Image (cartoon, rainbow, N blue to C red):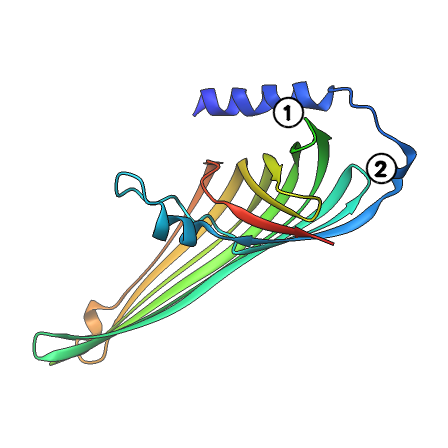
Amino acid sequence: MKKPILLLITLLFCFSHLSVAQTDEEENERFHEIGINVTTFINEFISLNNNDADLGDYMMTYKYHMGRNAIRFGLGGRFSQIDEPVGGGNRVTKENKFDVRLGYEWNQSISKKWSFYYGLDIVGGNSSSVTVATNSDEITTTEKFTYFGGGPMMGIQFFINSHISLSTESSLYYRYEQETSKVDFSIDTGSNSDVTSTNNLADFGLPTALFFVIRF
């Protein structure tokens, strides 16, 4: 973990001192960007060695640019329900996940087609899974997960034209996590359990998610 941390810090320091000529028009320009996570599409059509790229936490992003700087926002989530027969009974699992990100970034032009950006984010989210298994006894298993944190990020953007681009990014976030696991039996209530655990970690996010970005 130490090598990725040092690499990220070194790159952020170097690019923070990169000198790029800027016109008054660039400094005062205001515009918006909406990004859509297209990693699933890439996995579907360009799967390499049967190892799909990680989707990441955010399905959609938004940026408000103010010259070379930008306010950034990311949103992700999903919901699923699975019904399946198990033994002589039935099992229903419902899962949902929500992630949000808010941050600030600085942009540096590398060339006409390429741009580099770096910044800081605040992140948070939660997920839950409820499984109800019905047979001779009804067993309800509930798992809840919540996290918050933040840290530096950096990314790279390739411009197809002045309004359309592709981007990917990496991050190093501190995260505080809390997980609760609860099991309830409708008949054998003496076997019920409720366990809560917490964790602090450094989460290094690789640049595996690809975004299709529209600027306007």
Q: What x and y, as percent, mark residue 172? A: 53, 34
Tell me the quarter of the image containing the C terminus: bottom right
Residue at 56 percent across and 52 percent down: it is 124
Relative placement, left or right, of 15 versus 145 is right
| Residue type (three-letter) at the residue carrying disc 2 | Glu
Quadrant in which the N terminus appears: top left
Residue at mark 1: 12
Q: Is residue 205 above or below residue 128?
A: above
Furthest residue to the front?
A: 161
| 10 Å crowding of disc 1: few (<14), some (14-19), many (20+) | some
Distance CA(mark 2)–CA(mark 1): 22 Å
* Residue drawn at 68 percent across, 27 percent down: 111
Q: Residue at x 32, y 45 (%)?
A: 47
- The residue lying at 52 percent from left, 56 percent from top is 59
**Residue identifier under label 2:** 26
Q: Position of residue 17 (x, y in %)?
A: 74, 19
Q: Nearer the viewer, residue 61 or 21?
A: 21
